[in-house]
Amino acid sequence: MDTLNLNEPTSGSSTSRRTFLKGGGLLLGFALLGGTTTSVFAANAAQVTEDEVKAPFAPNGFIRIDPKGTVTLVMPMVEMGQGTYTSLAMLLAEELEVDLDQVQVQHAPPNDALYANSILHIQSTGLSSSVRAFWTPLRQAGAVGRTLLIAAAAKQWGVEPGTCKAAHGVVTDASGSKHLSYGELADAASKLPVPAADSVKLKEPKDFTLIGTPAKRVDTPMKVDGRAIYGIDTKLPGMKVAAISISPVFGGKVKTVDEKAALAVKGVHQVVKIDEAVAVVADHLGAAKKGLEAAAIEWDDGPHATVNTADIIMELEEKSKQPGAVARNEGDAEKALGSAAQRIDAIYQVPFLAHATMEPMNCTVHMQKDSCDIWVGTQVPTLTQMFVAGVTGFPKEAIRIHNHLLGGGFGRRLEPDGTVLAVKIAKQVDGPVKVVWSREEDIQHDMYRPYYYDRMSAGLDADGKPVAWTHRIAGSSIFARYVPQLFVNGLDPDAVEAAAEPPYALPNIHVDYVQVEPPGVPTAFWRGVGPTHNVFVVESFMDELAHAAKQDPVAYRKALLANNPRALGVLTLAAEKSGWDTPLPDGQGRGVSVAFIFGSYVAQVAEVTVGPDGAVKVNRIVCGLDCGLSVNPDTIEAQIQGGSIFGLTAVLHGAITIKDGRVEQSNFDNYLPMRIDEVPVIETHLVKSAEAPGGIGEVPTSIVSAAVTNAIFAATGKRVRTLPVDPEMLKSSS
Amino acid sequence: MLSPDFLARVNSTFPPAPATLEEAMAYNLKINGTAHSVDVDDDTPLLWVIRDVLGMTGTKFGCGAALCGACTVHIDGVATRSCITTVDSIGDSAITTIEAIGETPQGAALQKAWLDLEVVQCGYCQSGQLMSAAALLAETPKPTDEDINSAMSGNVCRCGTYQRIRAAIKQAAEA
């Protein structure tokens, strides 16, 4: 197979550019080419700009070029680490014919008309969809820009546009002797009629000079020396900061507050009470936190004070006995189960999970008479604007959202709850106020990945081949709350994603969903959404079937993937690169997992060691990936590494539990993140492909769990059906 | 996993405040070579002085309990969690933050390696990662994997950039 090995070092060709940027802050794009013009490209050393850039040449929502030569690309999706500011900039720059180091990128303002994601139909960064959604629109936007700039030059020279060429932000005539930079052309190009996006010719992939290269990220330089500005770094004249305490029991309300004690703390200005929370407003967070502690808040716990995880699980167990909304039904699974040579049943469970972004929830609000300003890092700027309109009564035009780099998203910042809370507080504060959650508030008032309870059954024929497959999923519906219009007849499409359509040829398949809402516990999307839960279940159960059939887990899957060449391809690749057939010492095991998710085909092989004490060490992850045409292979590798670790954290450590209506975990000492001493070697092997690009950010998080638990089975003979892994269960004696 | 040893070490970096300090005095802090006078309570964590009082936002808040390392600064060259270091414990010591770490040879080498290997994802933890790594290289110019584990396991990265952090520290050590 034709593959690209991402594990070999690539030459760092852009080091000089970094030095250049750091040194001068200006890139002398055209001047360096030896032309006669003195115009320059003013690419900032900080390539991400906070403020909305105005420029005469603005042929669409994405491109801004001013006469000084500053090229600004407006990013419709937000940067939360996944590299989207670089990959989306690459799509634009490829067709606009500028180099990445000639541009700055800007956070888009809220505007669904200009910036909606075509997959999600709203300006929302999620579902690993940025490149998929903007693959065509941004290349077209870039080509529109290039077409206009060339036309402006041709007009000035009195030649046919077809005889001119654009490269590196400069238009050149047929002879190569005349040059005009994009800055010089900006004014003239802005006066030409803008062609329709679908009327411009796009490059053939073979002519790409940027797409497909391991380009340097535009946001890295400012993230290694403290210059990067996240929402939490907002500074405004006269701004105060606030610490908050939210009712520890879900849905509880403030009863009493010792305001006097809080106000006695040096630097504290104000105590703000709203129904569900108290905020202490101060000069700095040290004072605000001290004031909050002094406030000795008492709470009215409300109706959820007896909620606990065990009861939630009991309800899931009970309600999952009844049929649910059908996601897929082919053949007659019940009948085939009845007549199968062998029947296998299993129950799988995955816990509530918090997002625990490194940047705790925060939002800065400046309420004014008829309008407000919001400084926040959000995955959903327009939705946030709509929610703020709801709590302020302002028209959306009066709500100015200033988006930021996100210190992690993982789905947490798809929810505007933090902004709504900050606005409620700010309504009582004179001047701008920055509300910052403590880590404890962040974990205990997250909106959680639902607890899912899955019932699996399969029938095998005499040869061990599956002849029946049933999968019932019970859990909270995020869609029912977040996108109720897509929650039809009791079916949550997210809850069944990757369960209803496993990559295998499975005759007689029945998949259904039972909505069970945990009382008071808010649930939300978490990195990998439906597939993070379902791929774990499906691929673990597939492993159980292989074992029941007494067949090798890779060979068993391959036989069921005969009609799915791309899935078969990544499985074969991962197995081969992992040395699947080579033996491992006692106490070690290899496990495999394969899926088609977020538009990408992926397989992983995990190698683990299980100690006599049940401790699991993941030694190595080998990933085979076919995500179609790759825009930035280095980002893809980074996502495979990081996304796998995000998933490993959940498999090995992640659980939010509830007792007496309160989340029991509070900080990184009891909601454990994976740390550097635990991480395995992660290898990425990419299938070279000309297919349309697939998603990547959530792919590894979804695939890694089953690879690890299947490896644990290979090492110990013990099947992990409930996450996270419980070392007690894996002890040698048990 | 964060070992109890590690926590004890991080949390005991600085001795408790001398009892003689008077309340409500202004503290004189030397940060990145510049003197700053701040009038805050003596138990105010250094982190909030740096971020909110002085407006230097490169140093990040992550946990408030020395569990994640996002707030790491150097105090007389020692990697220190500023979120639990009270302002009265610092005295005349020199504080260095991410904004100035590039002026040290270790900091500059690490920043270059971070760029060369594209370590960063969301970037929020990376100030703290670089500060911990710079202190490590200052003390142990050629760290082993174990040295790296020991010095860096207090720094959490939820994006999971650890593999590249390790590679970048090794590259910087070779520079």
Image (cartoon, grey):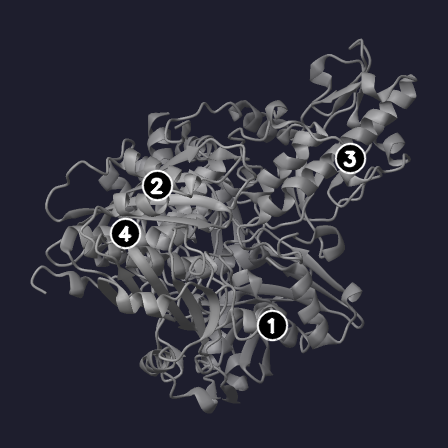
Chain for numbered disc 1: A
The image's mark for residue A144 is 3
**Quadrant of residue A311 in the image?**
bottom left
* Residue A146 placement: quadrant: top right
Q: Which type of secondary structure does the marked residue at label 2 adopt?
A: helix
Q: Which residue is mark 1?
A: A484
Give the structural element (helix, strand or loop) at label 4.
helix
Element type where label 3 sits in the image: helix
Position of the N terminus of chain A by quadrant? top left
Q: Residue at x 67, y 70 (%)?
A: A387
Callout 2 amino acid: Leu
Residue highlighted by disc 4? A708
**Earlier-in-chain disc, 1 versus 2:** 1
**Amino acid at circle 3:** Val
Is any part of residue B14 visible from this angle? no
* Identity, as a three-letter code, of the amino acid under mark 1: Pro
In the rendered image, the quadrant that contains the C terminus of chain A is: bottom left
**Callout 1 crowding tier (Cα within 10 Å): few <14, some 14–19, many ≥20:** few
Pointer 2: residues within 10 angstroms few (<14), some, or many (20+)?
many
Marks 4 & 2, CB-CB < 8 Å contact: no
